[in-house]
Image (cartoon, grey):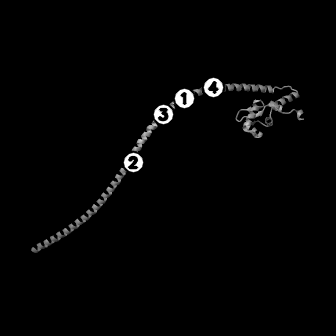
């Protein structure tokens, strides 16, 4: 019986020792795990502290920028006030200009009325000139009985006052079709201004007819002028 008890005690001791050893191993393992976890936590805490420091630095930079923007805003407000005053001054000037403009518009209305009166007078004068020209054409178309010496005298009077250039233009238009001033200028080799004055003179003195349907005007020799420019057969012989 004692042996049995000793055996049991021995077994219990062996189990106790084994359990104690296993418990010690578990404690060591847990201690190692704790140390690893503590290191990881410390790393996390250090990283978190670094992040907090960076955020604090950023917040400080933002605060500096906000202060700068606030100072610039004060300057902008001052400029805005100055600009508003300038706008008020310009608006006052615009009101003065509008008042002056009303006077100018009234003067323009008077000038327009006078212009219309002048245009009406011009149209009346133009109608009279047209009627007079038609009467002259009718008179010129009326056959007249003249002796040869009379024709020679009228031709001499009509052509004798012309310059060589004017006579050249009349002969050219008599021999060819109607032409514009630029086309005549190419023929006679004159400047544009000289040609314009020449054609105006010949038209106003009754040597030419003018087509005013479109610009530039086309000029042609009047029929009675063509007859005067043709030499009598006795002279041609």
- State the mark number for residue 79: none
The image position of residue 143, as x and y in percent, is 83, 26
Mark 4 and mark 1 residues within 8 Å of each other at the beta carbon: no
Tell me which numbered mark, 2 or 4, is placed earlier along the sequence: 2
Do tag 2 and tag 3 residues touch (Cβ < 8 Å)?
A: no
Q: Is residue 103 left or right of residue 225?
A: left
Q: Mark 1 touching mark 2, by CB under 8 A?
A: no
Q: Which residue is drawn at the image coordinates 49% and 32% (left, top)?
A: 92
* Residue annotated with mark 4: 114
Q: CA distance from mark 1 to mark 3?
A: 17 Å
In the image, 98: left or right of 76? right
Q: Position of residue 114 (x, y in %)?
A: 63, 25
Q: Earlier in the sequence, mark 4 or mark 1?
A: 1
Instruction: List the single residue furthest toward the bottom.
Output: 3
Mark 2 highlights which residue? 65
Q: CA distance from mark 3 to mark 4?
A: 38 Å
Q: Secondary structure at mark 3?
A: helix
Q: Nearer the viewer, mark 2 or mark 3?
A: 3
Q: Residue at x 14, y 72 (%)?
A: 10
Please, what secondary structure does the residue beneath circle 4 have?
helix
Residue 59, above or below 218: below
Q: Are marks 2 and 4 in contact (CB under 8 Å)?
A: no
């Amino acid at each position: 019986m004692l042996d049995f008890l000793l055996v049991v005690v021995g077994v219990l001791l062996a189990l106790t020792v084994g359990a104690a050893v296993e418990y010690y191993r578990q404690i060591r393992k847990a201690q190692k795990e704790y140390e690893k976890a503590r290191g990881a936590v410390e790393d996390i805490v250090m990283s978190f502290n670094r992040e907090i420091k960076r955020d604090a630095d950023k917040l400080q930079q933002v605060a500096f920028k906000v202060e700068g923007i606030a100072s610039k805003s004060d300057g902008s407000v001052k400029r805005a006030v100055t600009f508003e005053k300038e706008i008020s001054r310009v608006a006052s000037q615009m009101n003065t200009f509008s008042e002056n403009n009303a006077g100018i518009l009234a003067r323009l209305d008077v000038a327009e009325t006078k212009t219309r009166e002048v245009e009406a007078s011009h149209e009346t004068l133009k109608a009279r000139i047209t009627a007079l020209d038609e009467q002259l054409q009718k008179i010129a178309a009326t056959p007249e009985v003249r002796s040869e010496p009379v024709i020679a005298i009228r031709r001499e009077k009509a052509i004798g006052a012309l310059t060589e250039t004017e006579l050249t233009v009349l002969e050219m238009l008599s021999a060819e079709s109607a032409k514009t001033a630029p086309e005549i200028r190419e023929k006679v080799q004159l400047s544009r201004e000289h040609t314009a004055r020449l054609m105006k003179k010949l038209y106003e003195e009754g040597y030419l007819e003018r087509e005013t349907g479109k610009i530039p005007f086309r000029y042609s020799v009047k029929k009675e002028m063509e007859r005067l420019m043709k030499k009598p057969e006795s002279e041609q012989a």
